[in-house]
Image (tube, grey):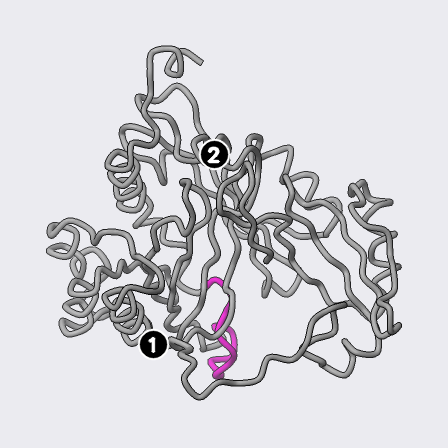
């Protein structure tokens, strides 16, 4: 993701999802034939090691098709102008393993959903409405799209209208000047260690700033809501001390926490998550790789997250609704 500072503030511009193909030109042609808007026609790198093309996803976010000899050799710097980054002994990884999912905010959910499903072949993985995820003041509608193997997850949000408070999604669309990536979820296998390290770095004046923790009553009922066999008393205590939220589905557990926006506007932020469980095949009982989306997407925490963002925006002087806005 390229970072820029222009009329959109400090945020992700021309956010890009790289898709590796054996024949990226054919993938680009098929996507365009299916209705995708081409951003960049297939072109070769100066050294001829790879072919790159792009189609629009939503707003200024693009899907990039990449193929070529450098890609097949698993080169980490196959794009033009990229060079290998040498490891530094002082570098801190914080235990982050990979991106779990990327969430986009759009004005019209169904229109964007149909466009993405048509050009990519993605299918619905999960869906949430304002009744599931909003507060008494604002809300959103959301759908999660997934690739065929469900290893790529692209949630999409749209704002609801007519609520007491302007939807946070509408605030994003205004401050980002259109659709874009709302947040990037980063997966770790030890969220307690990761968050301790992030908080330690922030205390030293660097790194990411995390959202304020939930209210005490959230943790007072946490194990009762999820089940005492889902989280131990020690794990629940660690969640409370670090401000981590927890949720679960029928097979697994989701531990999550969110950062404050990383720029000067209420736009891009990060989510740190750990998924626990979902490693047993329900049909055979055999151990298998963890199921994508294990533990869900924090449906039980959406209201708490919305409340935290609303309070953050109020303190920051963001999302002040006047009578004209409420009538729109």
- Circle 1 sits on which residue? 190
Residue 175, disc? 2
Q: Quadrant of the C terminus?
A: top left
Q: Position of residue 255 (x, y in %)?
A: 32, 64
The magenta segment: 282-293
Name the one closer to the observer, 188 or 234: 188
Q: Quadrant of residue 180?
A: top right
Instruction: State yes or no: residue 292 in magenta.
Output: yes
**Secondary structure category for the residue under label 2:** helix
The numbered mark at residue 322 is none
x 43%, y 48%: residue: 263
Does 183 lie within the magenta span?
A: no
x and y percent of residue 186 in the render? 45, 65
- The correct choice, above or below, for 127 with respect to 186 in the image is above
Secondary structure at badge 1 equals loop
* Distance in Å between CA atoms under marks 2 and 1: 34 Å
Q: Earlier in the sequence, mark 2 or mark 1?
A: 2
Q: Nearer the viewer, residue 245 or 290?
A: 245
Name the residue rendered at 83%, 58% in the picture.
Answer: 27
Q: Give the quarter of the image for residue 244.
A: bottom left
Q: State the image coordinates of residue 265 (x, y, percent, origin top left).
A: 42, 40
- Please name which of the two marks, 2 or 1, marks the residue nearer to the observer: 2
Residue at x-position 23% and y-position 66%: 203
User: Could you tell me which residue is drawn at 33 percent across and 60 percent down?
Assistant: 256
Main secondary structure type of the part rendered in magenta? loop
x, y percent for residue 173: 50, 33
In-image side of 43 versus 176 (left or right): right
């Amino acid at each position: 993701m390229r970072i820029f500072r222009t009329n959109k503030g400090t945020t992700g511009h021309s956010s890009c999802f790289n898709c590796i193909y054996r024949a990226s030109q054919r993938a680009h042609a098929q996507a365009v034939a299916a209705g995708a808007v081409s951003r960049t026609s297939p072109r070769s790198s100066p050294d001829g090691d790879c072919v790159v093309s792009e189609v629009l996803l939503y707003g200024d976010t693009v899907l990039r098709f990449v193929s070529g000899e450098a890609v097949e050799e698993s080169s980490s710097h196959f794009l033009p102008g990229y060079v290998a980054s040498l490891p530094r002994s002082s570098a801190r990884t914080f235990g982050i393993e990979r991106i779990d999912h990327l969430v986009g905010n759009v004005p019209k959910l169904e229109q964007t959903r149909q466009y993405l499903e048509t050009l990519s072949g993605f299918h619905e993985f999960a869906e949430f409405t304002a009744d599931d995820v909003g507060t008494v003041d604002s809300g959103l509608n959301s759908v999660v799209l997934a690739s065929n193997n469900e290893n790529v997850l692209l949630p999409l949000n749209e704002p609801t209208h007519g609520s007491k408070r302007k939807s946070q999604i509408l605030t994003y669309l205004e401050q980002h000047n259109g659709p874009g990536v709302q947040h990037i979820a980063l997966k770790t296998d030890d969220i307690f260690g990761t968050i301790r390290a992030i908080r330690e770095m922030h205390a030293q004046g660097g790194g990411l700033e995390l959202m304020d923790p939930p209210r005490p009553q959230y943790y007072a009922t946490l194990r009762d809501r999820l089940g005492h066999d889902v989280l131990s008393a020690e794990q629940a205590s660690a969640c409370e001390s670090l401000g981590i939220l927890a949720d679960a589905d029928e097979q697994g557990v989701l531990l999550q926490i969110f950062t404050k926006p990383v720029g000067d506007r209420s736009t891009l932020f990060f989510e740190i998550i750990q998924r626990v469980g979902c490693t047993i095949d329900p049909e055979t009982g055999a151990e298998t790789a963890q199921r994508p989306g294990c533990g869900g997407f924090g449906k039980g925490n959406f209201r708490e997250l919305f409340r935290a963002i609303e309070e953050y925006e109020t303190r920051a002087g963001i999302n002040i609704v006047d009578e004209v806005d409420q009538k729109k």
